Image: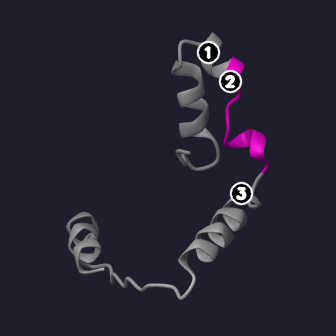
Amino acid sequence: MERLYREMRALVPQEYELDISLSESPVEQAWIGARDWASQRPFTEWSVTRDEWESSQKRKPWLKLLSSKGGALV
């Protein structure tokens, strides 16, 4: 946790508080977080199909991922 804090502190502006904690069940918490994130919007808005990826020389899918609803990269 100390190493993670140091590495994150270097990336997060000083005006933001940074708190790192360890869950009692980290695997379950990771699953819950992924589930909640994925349920926020339709899967097709933040994903690309294999055909899209392979047929577009990889540029178009990257643009779709970066521009869809806030630019979240998956």
Q: Is residue 1 left or right of residue 38?
A: left
Name the N-terminal-most of marks 1 and 3: 3
Q: State the mark number for residue 65.
A: none
User: Mark 3 and mark 2: span between their CA atoms?
Assistant: 19 Å
User: Mark 1 and mark 3: span between their CA atoms?
Assistant: 24 Å
Q: Are marks 1 and 3 in contact (CB under 8 Å)?
A: no
**Percent position (x, y) of residue 41?**
76, 54
Name the residue at 76% across, 39% down. Answer: 44
Amino acid type, callout 1: Glu
Asked if residue 45 is among those painted magenta in the image, a careful observer would answer yes
Asked if residue 49 is among those painted magenta in the image, a careful observer would answer yes
Name the N-terminal-most of marks 3 and 2: 3
**Percent position (x, y) of residue 74?**
56, 45
**Percent position (x, y) of residue 35?**
71, 64
Element marked by disc 1? helix
Element marked by disc 2? helix
Name the residue at 57% across, 82% down. Answer: 25
Reading the image, the residue beneath label 3 is 38
Q: Is residue 9 left or right of residue 49?
A: left
Reading the image, the residue beneath label 1 is 54
Name the residue at 58% across, 72% down. Answer: 27
Depth-wise, is mark 3 or mark 2 nearer the camera?
A: 2
In magenta, the rendered stretch is: 42-51
* Viewer-nearest residue: 31 or 38: 31
Query: From what the image shows, is residue 44 above or below residue 62?
Result: below
**Percent position (x, y) of residue 4?**
29, 72
In the rendered image, the quadrant that contains the N terminus is bottom left
Q: State the mark number for residue 50.
A: 2
Query: From what the image shows, is residue 7 above or below residue 41?
Result: below
